[in-house]
Image (cartoon, rainbow, N blue to C red):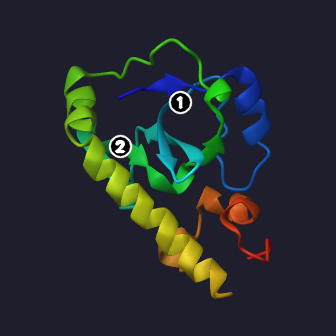
Amino acid sequence: MKIRLLTEAAYNRIIILKETMSKKDRGYGVIPIKIKNITFAIPFRSNMAHKHGFKTIFHNGVWNGVDYSKAIIITEDDLQPKAFKLRSEAEYQKVKNNKDKIQRQFEKYVNDYVSQAKLGKLPNLQRFGYTTLINYHEEFGVGDSSI
C-alpha cells in the first residue's frame, strides 16, 4: 500500500477547492485509491471527530484515521515518489491490514454521494456536509455542479 505526500503543484491546485484541508506547512500523507478510472487521494487526519473514514489509532485523546470526506481527485504525477512515514508502525500496520476494507468503505462513500447528487438531492448534510466530493460533479457525471 502506497502512502505518499502530494507534490507542491498538486497541493497548490487543490487548496482552492471547496472543503479541502489547507495547512500548507504541514503536509498530509495520503492513500491513493482508484475507483473505475478515477484516482483519489484520501488524507490521513490526526483528529477524526466524525465517522466518515477509517479510524486507525487513538493518540493524545483523539482518533487518527483516513478521512473519506476530504478525498481529492489526482493523477499519479500528483504524488511524490518517496513514501510518507506515519507517526507509528501500529497505524501503518492497521491501514495495511485493512486496505481492502478501506477500499470498500470509500467506494461506498463515493457511490452514495454520487447516487444522491444524481437524483438532484442536496447530499445528506450529516454525512456529506463538508465533503470535497462537491468539487467533482463533472467527473461523476452529475449534471448540476452547484449541488
Residue 62 visible to an observer of this rendering: no
Determine the residue positioned at 79% across, 77% down: 144
Q: Position of residue 134 (x, y in %)?
A: 68, 64
Q: Position of residue 4 (x, y in %)?
A: 49, 24
Q: Is residue 145 above or below residue 83?
A: below
Q: Position of residue 22 (x, y in %)?
A: 67, 39
| Drawn side of residue 16 relative to residue 73, left or right | right
| Mark 2 surroundings within 10 Å by alpha-carbon count, few (fewer than 14), some (14 through 19), many (20 or more) | many
Residue 114 visible to an observer of this rendering: yes
Q: How many marks?
A: 2
Quarter of the image for residue 31 reads top left
Label 1 amino acid? Tyr
Q: Secondary structure at mark 2?
A: strand
Q: Secondary structure at mark 1?
A: loop
Residue at the farthest front position:
37
Q: Where is mark 1, residue-wise?
A: 28
**Quadrant in which the N terminus appears:** top left
Quick one: 37 or 14, which is closer to the camera? Answer: 37
| Drawn side of residue 20 relative to residue 81, left or right | right
Label 2 amino acid? Gly
| Mark 1 surroundings within 10 Å by alpha-carbon count, few (fewer than 14), some (14 through 19), many (20 or more) | many
| Drawn side of residue 60 relative to residue 40, left or right | left
**Quadrant in which the C terminus appears:** bottom right
Determine the residue positioned at 40% across, 44% down: 66
Determine the residue positioned at 61% across, 47% down: 72
Q: Where is mark 2, residue-wise?
A: 65
- Pointer 1 and pointer 2: residues touching (CB < 8 Å)? no
Q: Is residue 37 above or below residue 2?
A: below
Quick one: 139 or 131, which is closer to the camera? Answer: 139
